[in-house]
Amino acid sequence: MTSSSASGKRQHVVETAYVLFKRAGFHATGIDRIIAEADVAKMTMYRHFPSKDELIVEVLDYRAMRFDRQLARLTQEDVPPEQKIGRIFDWHGRWFRSPDFHGCLFAHALAEFGDPGHPVFKAVVRQKNGLKRRMRSILEDMMPRGRAESVAATLLMLIEGATLLAQMGQADAAIRDARKAAMGIVAASRRPQ
Amino acid sequence: MTSSSASGKRQHVVETAYVLFKRAGFHATGIDRIIAEADVAKMTMYRHFPSKDELIVEVLDYRAMRFDRQLARLTQEDVPPEQKIGRIFDWHGRWFRSPDFHGCLFAHALAEFGDPGHPVFKAVVRQKNGLKRRMRSILEDMMPRGRAESVAATLLMLIEGATLLAQMGQADAAIRDARKAAMGIVAASRRPQ
DNA sequence: TAGGTATGAGACAGACCTGTCTCACTACTA
DNA sequence: TAGTAGTGAGACAGGTCTGTCTCATACCTA
């Protein structure tokens, strides 16, 4: 990490904070810990982010962007909608089995910042709605708009629930059951009524 | 609250802590806040609970017990299994609409205590497995044991996902879609294959 | 060379954290 | 009446928290 890169330090702080927040949570991770791990001066951090809360929002937005990009790449290919949905669930299954899986950072953020007016809360809502919107647009190719919204919400619930069960050590069964239920719901909703 | 009741203070601390944890989270709620709200001396609290972590476990176990009791009462009547499952979802719907709903305290605890070896983590797993077990035993009256386990896990995921969406302000749509999906899955699994 | 920008290092403030300790008080019981 | 258990009030220790401040240093560019 050379100091010449325009905002190298800034991004490095975001990524370091992400890892720490993911492992230990938001309140339990102090600024001192973040700057020590990132090997950055405290003032460097505070010059880029006016407060810890804004750093948290930045971390969440950054991860949401990366997640959305992966999702887009995963579903851009010209395959049937069912298969696209299947790929989303498969992707989650691989995520659950990844070595540093600690549950959903956004769900955790919602747990620690439950005030709907808080910027962190809003960042979480943005991400979850983004995922739902993406699934809905896939489903709209095979069912009416209103039905697609309902089915997308249901799939989102299955994904969120599976993520929670995966964090409790039931990753394999969770993704299997969730995927099966999802495919069943999608198949049952095929065609305009 | 008379001081004569054997463990009146103890239970009062548990219930006060529950309200505060629910609203603000675990790390964000300090001991000082709890004893001030409960109007007890600090030593009174520390004589009953050796540490904050053990108080948290006590709060979770207490809430898990109350929840399980309500669930038992809700499903003891002699009605078809489908109807029992429907009642569980309806109960969650009412919970989502209750004035002081802040999401699932156990899911929040999992977010803040992600270490599988931590007593709080274990308390969460106990509660979630308890809910799953109860649904499984209902389902076993209408489908094979292995199928009941899978369906119960799926219903649990729907409930957890619906709770998260409800916290994000989509309570009505969430419980409607989750209930509908659940009833569909249960109906599709009826009879021993 | 001169100037501007980003950074490093760390002291510092003020608040809050968990947990311990002492001493006095109340209420009940033997 | 004497003793015991539970409690209240608050000081206290030692640590951590967020956020601010100063001063020195490195680097790039004009």
Image (cartoon, coloured by chain):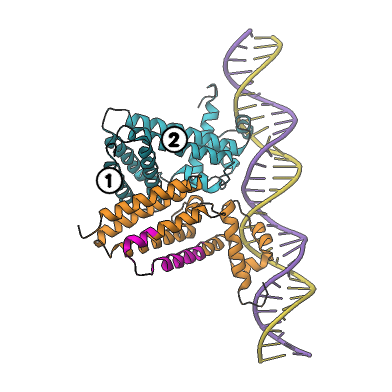
Chain colours: A orange, B cyan, C purple, D yellow
Residue at mark 2: chain: B
Mark 1 nearby-residue class (10 Å; few <14, some 14–19, many ≥20): some
Q: Hey, which quadrant is residue B30 in on the image? A: top right
Q: Percent from the top left, x then y, of residue B193?
A: 29, 39
Percent coordinates x, y for residue B105 in the rendering: 47, 43
Residue A20 vs residue B190, the one in the foreground? B190
- Name the mark nearer the viewer: 1 or 2: 1
Is residue A26 something that shows in the picture?
no
Residue A105 in percent (x, y) is at: 51, 55
Please state the chain letter of the residue tagged with numbered disc 1 in the rendered image: B
Q: Which mark is residue B184?
A: 1
Residue at the outermost left position: A193
Residue projecting furthest to the front? B193
Judge whether residue A65 can be spotted in this image. yes
On the rendered image, what quadrant is the C terminus of chain A found in? bottom left
Residue at 39% x, 66% y: name it. A75
Tell me the residue that label 2 is attached to.
B130
In magenta, the rendered stretch is A60-86
Asked if residue A173 lies left or right of residue A151, the reply is: right
At mark 2, the secondary structure is helix
